[in-house]
Amino acid sequence: MLNRRKFLMGTGAAALGALVLPKAASAFLSSAGEHPLGLQLFTLFNVIDADVKGNLKKVADIGFKEIESAFSKLPGYYGMKPKEFAALCSDLGLSWKSHHVLGAPFKLPPGTKLPKGMTLPAHMLNLKEDMQALVDQVAEGGIPYLVCANIPTGTLDEIKEAGEILNKTGEACKKVNIQLCYHNHDMEFKTVEGKVPYHELLSECDAKLVKMELDLAWATKAGIDPVELFKAHPGRFPLLHVKDISKDFTTLEPVGEGVVKFKYIFEHVKEAGAKHYFVEHDMPKDPFASIATSYKNLRAMGV
């Protein structure tokens, strides 16, 4: 189901479980000349903290070469300081390219109930209140990209504030050779008081300071053609979330099992300026089976 929007700005505790890497996964190793594929670690949210090193090794064994981190149940970066986590990734042959953070304080909508076993910390770091601390942490880890995973855009005032926060963060990132990006869901494409938030952010944010990580499934759900965005804003999309969704737009799927037009989209990655592709499937029942399928299908597409 579509869990990430409910979950995205929370760091709660979920039931831990160990999943076994499918036997066939080791056959999906990338070959010379293929673009390195990455994984957004939110895909492993329900399992990664039980054995961070072991689970990252499974990711590497499937063939993934790059990772994008997010929040987890453990403090810091999966229970580690930035340099420690960077060293672990390097030892496993994984390149830590990007990290997701919140854009503003998390506010649970009135009447919303958290999933069983999930709790929220008293304070979750966010760009509005903790921008410099977050930038410093990413710089310490030697990560080239910092991504705002989500920020309120439900009113024109929120959209204006979002642009200000992103521009300010982009300036701070530039000073330490980090590129800030913004990650979308489908909500940014819904008209607000006559304006489309995503288009407003594209125009109000400095194109050099704030680039985009386009989530292909959410854009597809919103009825957006990613290629048209690439053409309208060439070079603005260095990161892609390679995610798939069912025909009725209710369920996220392994890449290649839904309706996202990946072949068509990847024919235009040069126009996008895309450099890194991160597979993501929001908390699937069997994450390793899902990412092995996604990896296999992407390689079969020639990605």
Image (cartoon, rainbow, N blue to C red):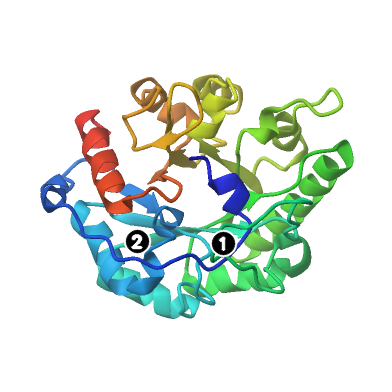
State whether residue 181 appears in this view. no
Tell me which numbered mark, 2 or 1, is placed earlier along the sequence.
Answer: 2
Q: Quadrant of residue 35?
A: top left
From the viewer's perspective, is residue 28 above or below residue 233? below
- Choose between 119 and 279: the one closer to the eye: 119
Residue at position x 69%, y 34% in the image: 188
Residue, disc 1: 177
Residue, disc 2: 95
Q: Is residue 205 left or right of residue 90?
A: right
Within 10 angstroms of label 1, few (less than 14), some, or many (20 or more) residues? some
For the image, the number of numbered tags is 2
Residue at position x 42%, y 57% in the image: 41
Q: Is residue 294 left or right of residue 243?
A: left
Quadrant showing the C terminus: top left
Residue 12 in percent (x, y) is at 57, 66
Q: Amino acid at mark 2?
A: Ser
- Alpha carbon of mark 2 to alpha carbon of mark 1: how far? 17 Å
Residue at position x 33%, y 69% in the image: 89
Q: Amino acid at mark 1?
A: Asn
SS for tag 1?
loop
- Choose between 194 and 106: the one closer to the eye: 106
- Choose between 1 and 294: the one closer to the eye: 1
Of badges 2 and 1, nearer the viewer stands 2
Q: Quadrant of residue 160?
A: top right
Residue at position x 63%, y 67% in the image: 135
